[in-house]
Image: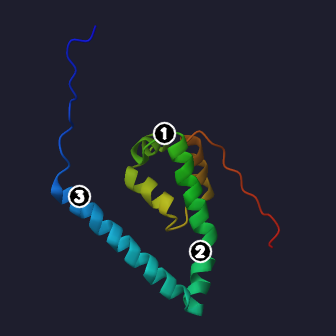
Amino acid sequence: MILRVFVKKPPQTPASEIALALNRIKESKKLSALKKELMDDVEFKKEYDSLEQEFKFAGRMIEARLQARLSQEQVASRMGTTQSVVARIESGRPLPSIRTLMRYAAAVGRKLEIALPKAA
């Protein structure tokens, strides 16, 4: 028998946080338009495309960390370094050494494999 039911309402999201989120959505749209415009420039597109492999690799590193359900701080602790170092590693700037990549891979429960497939 149910005698009483009530719903506990979470605290309301502050208006400043909603405004910030809406601003970021607008900025994101502006950045998309800017990227599209810049991609029309042949030199820009060439440079952008030259970084594709680095960005893909950085994305795979972040994906591996997220799949391991680890924060940057937790990975840093496992590597014996700081969170800011992990953030730089994940940004791909500057390019980390193979030894650093091996330590990162071990920290997220992976093994580093380097492949050199034939170019298309």
For marks 1 and 3, the one nearer the N-term is 3
Say whether residue 59 is left or right of residue 1: right
Q: Position of residue 111 (x, y in %)?
A: 66, 44
Say whether residue 26 is left or right of residue 56: left
At horizontal 24% and vertical 63% (from top left) the residue drawn is 20
Say whether residue 67 is left or right of residue 113: left
Position of residue 91 relative to residue 50, above or below, is above
* Residue named by callout 1: 69
Position of residue 54 relative to residue 100, above or below, is below
* Residue named by callout 3: 18
Instruction: Specify how the rendered protein is coloured.
Output: rainbow
Q: Residue 110 is drawn in which quadrant?
A: top right
Tell me how far mark 1 sits from mark 2, CA to CA.
Answer: 27 Å
At horizontal 48% and vertical 81% (from top left) the residue drawn is 35
At horizontal 45% and vertical 76% (from top left) the residue drawn is 32
Q: Quadrant of the C terminus?
A: bottom right
The residue closer to the viewer here, 14 or 4, is 4
At horizontal 45% and vertical 53% (from top left) the residue drawn is 86
Give the crowd class for mark 2: few <14, some 14-19, many >=20 residues within 10 Å: few
Q: Residue 60 is drawn in which quadrant?
A: bottom right
| Residue positioned most to the right | 118
Give the crowd class for mark 3: few <14, some 14-19, many >=20 residues within 10 Å: few
Give the crowd class for mark 1: few <14, some 14-19, many >=20 residues within 10 Å: few
* Residue named by callout 2: 51
Callout 2 amino acid:
Leu
Callout 1 amino acid:
Arg
